[in-house]
Amino acid sequence: MNTLSLEILKEIKNLVNFDMGSLLVLNNDNLEVIISYEAEFNRVRSELASKILTIEDRRSFHAILTTYKKSLMCNDIDSQFSNFIQIDGNRPAKSVIGVPLVSRKKLIGMLILEQRRPNAFSIEEYNTISKISDNIAVSVDNAILHEKLSSMALTDSLTNVSNRHGLHLSWQSLSEQAIRHQWQISFMVIDIDHFKIFNDKYGHKTGDEVLRLVANVLKSSTRGSDLIARFGGEEFVVILPNTADDQALLVAQKIQASLTQQQENQMEGTVTVSIGITTQLAEDGLTIDCLFKEADEQMYLAKDAGRNKVQQSTTVKKSQAK
């Protein structure tokens, strides 16, 4: 979305002279900065992205835009809007044009153009930007929709972890890095024990709660650099980069212990998982399918051993381990 947002702001710069332009989207009753572009230095102010502007005073500049959905220009912010919410407090705006972005009859956000000197904007510039506000709103709305669809295409909607497609995309960049650094890759297959029986006995709603519980346990038991995905049904996978077999075993044991702990007085029945692990040295030709096949076999050995167990294998020789 940032790429398209930047293109929009650069196109506006050709029509209206501004020091900084920002696109904000409505987030509940607040405004969230999507992008701030400092035109005078031709740079994106990445540190301002995701900044939340809380609208508390209904007489403020942003509140008036939100309420009346009409463009507003002020060439003397300090005297006319002393409560103006500055996006960049270190370099405050003195002149501002605000444009509400309305798409499909709904306010989705606003465009804020700033100059750091008073009396900077002309009425011609104000009229120009007001006339194209509908086009800007449609472009921003399409960008938001595209981002949501992209996220949905890569994420399992029930558990909010990656789906199979998302995992494969993440693996492409991870595998290149792993090969370059000759990392060991530990790959887990986690399968919920007796899930069908559990689902049939307590109902699909409870079954969904179980899937979300397991996903949350996986997220809390792993690092931010690890990859987690729902691979299908009641089966999850976790990829642990730069992780030896003994370290992977500790993670698996942590997952099982955390799952037991988080269920206390919260879940009907008892949820356990069987985990299969394979640890292999990253090299050309190593694929998710290869790793999954070996880890899946280990997972079934864990099932055969009585469930709620961990089984693992490794192809890494001690001489290869770093």
Image (spheres, rainbow, N blue to C red):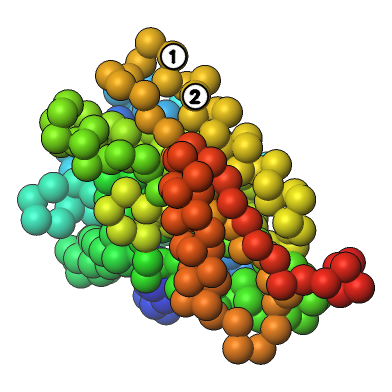
Secondary structure beneath label 1: loop
Is residue 134 visible from the viewing direction of this image? Answer: yes
- Identify the residue under disc 2: 260
In the drawing, does residue 94 fall left or right of residue 160?
right
Residue beneath the point at 54% across and 34% down: 256
From what the image shows, is residue 75 above or below residue 272?
below
Give the residue at x 53% y 69%: 294
Please give left or right for residue 122 compared with residue 67 in the image: right
The image quadrant of residue 81 is: top left
**Number of the label disc, if any, that sits on residue 264:** 1
Residue at 31% x, 54% y is 156
Secondary structure category for the residue under label 2? helix
Q: Are marks 1 and 2 in contact (CB under 8 Å)?
A: yes
Which residue sits at x=44%, y=14%?
A: 264
Q: Quadrant of residue 175?
A: bottom right
In the rendered image, the vertical position of residue 70 relative to residue 104, given as above or below: above
